[in-house]
Amino acid sequence: MSDIDIRKVVAEELNNIAPEVDMASVDPAADLREAIDIDSMDFLNFITAIHGRLGVDIPEIDYPKLVTLDGAVAYLTAHLKSA
Amino acid sequence: MPSLGADMEAGTLVQWLVKPGAQVKHGDIIAVVETQKGAIEIETFESGQIEKFLVDVGTKVPVGTPLALIRTEGEAKPAAPPAPPPKAAPAAPPKAAAPPARPPGPTLAPPVAAGARASPAARKLAEERGIDLSTVTGSGPAGAITYADVETRVGAAGAPAAAPEKKRAPALNLDAMRTAIAAAMARSKREIPHYYLEHQVDVTACEQWLTQKNAALPPDSRLLIGALALRAVAFACRRFPAFNGFYRENKFEPSAAVHTGVAIAIRGGGLTAPALHDADKLALDDLMARMRDLIQRTRAGRIRGSELSDPTITVSSLGERGVEALYGVIYPPQVAIVGFGKVVTRPWVIDGAIGPRSVVTITLAADHRVSDGHAGALFLAEIGKLLQEPDKL
């Protein structure tokens, strides 16, 4: 899966949580919790959805690595390659 | 038409989810009703067979109006037809040009709605697009307006092409929700003599326990600290019944069941606090699953009637990005609301030495007609104590 495809999946899943947000306009380095106003339940749903779609295991201890768009894409790219 | 909150006077029936003749049992979802709080799924409190509907889709009726006739098992067919429901206020379409009402069926006593019959999805789309339903031609059963009909009308009006599904605004009417919040909160501040307490609690044990437990769990089974908080409040309610129940007709009625209202923020600015039933009895995993489901359904505009009408106490948390303490406004006829601030790392004294600990500020707003600060303090202390032993929650 390419970097672009992963970015698309991440954006789609975030849009399922925050439908009104134009993900293209979100700063890829911004903390998503602030940038698109998601809470801990939203974030858990996001992780669950990503886990379901990409099969990447994301332990809780790694959550901080996924709080930005760029961070999430980098993390998932690395884990999909190593899988 | 059930009352879905102290401030509700009427509701509009938007959809039947069963057909006449269907067998239903207590707790089955049988209809969808539109209220200020959005579309609410209505459960039946009777078991039996749906004899007939007494209210038409699209009709706005006062709270207390019978919606359907259910023949309970063993009950003979009624000799006389049931009394027609009290006069139904016709749903008011925004424009005067309502279409001719559907002719009443031979056995249909209640007045027929002036509003157009339309599916909930069609209604939502029409509202979002500013389309008057009375100007749409229905192609569904009995001339009901379908989603496709509204789409066609949108196209005909030269309105912008429909945005992709996911971009659409939430199903909830936030202006109406604001009106409902205003009514309930104004009543609360007018009638309930609140008192407020706060208590700082070390929740390091909860965090450590969760980290350990969640490490072995897939994401869909992981727990949040909010589930522990809800559980601690529910347990504390059992020991301190003066905070769990309803104040009605100048007296307090404690509740044997603990149905914690969970304050849920709606994207775009809205708030509702549906009940998580029996929060003191469910296993913690089930409690978490139910909380997750409740929050998802609420944000999607799919709350059930009983969840809106019977919370016995409310728990509010502004989350990990919020503030350290929040002072709630009690939702009448409840008598208490417990607030959880965000968890912060603070220097803390343990066994004479200072160390960093995770600390949360828990607040209580309670009704002075029912309890005093002394009892409130014991209640908060109990919640704090319960959070020291998360494995027992």
Image: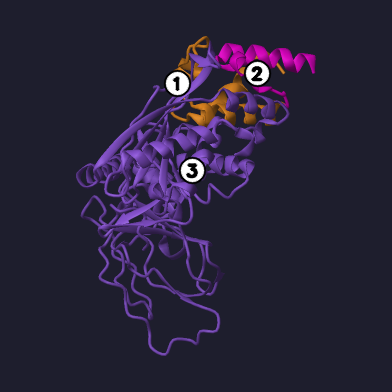
The N terminus of chain B: image quadrant = bottom left
Which residue is disc 3 drawn over? B236
The disc, 1 or 3, on the residue closer to the chain's N-terminal end is: 3
Q: Are callouts 2 and 1 both on one chain?
A: no
Q: Nearer the viewer, residue A39 or B16?
A: A39
Q: Chain of mark 3?
A: B
The rendered magenta stretch, by its main secondary structure, is classed as helix
The disc placed on residue B298 is none
Chain A drawn colour: orange
The C terminus of chain B: image quadrant = top right
Q: Residue furthest bottom?
A: B79
Q: Amino acid at mark 1?
A: Arg
Which residue is disc 1 drawn over? B321
> Callout 2: helix, strand or loop?
helix
Which residue is disc 2 drawn over? A61
Q: Are callouts 3 and 2 both on one chain?
A: no
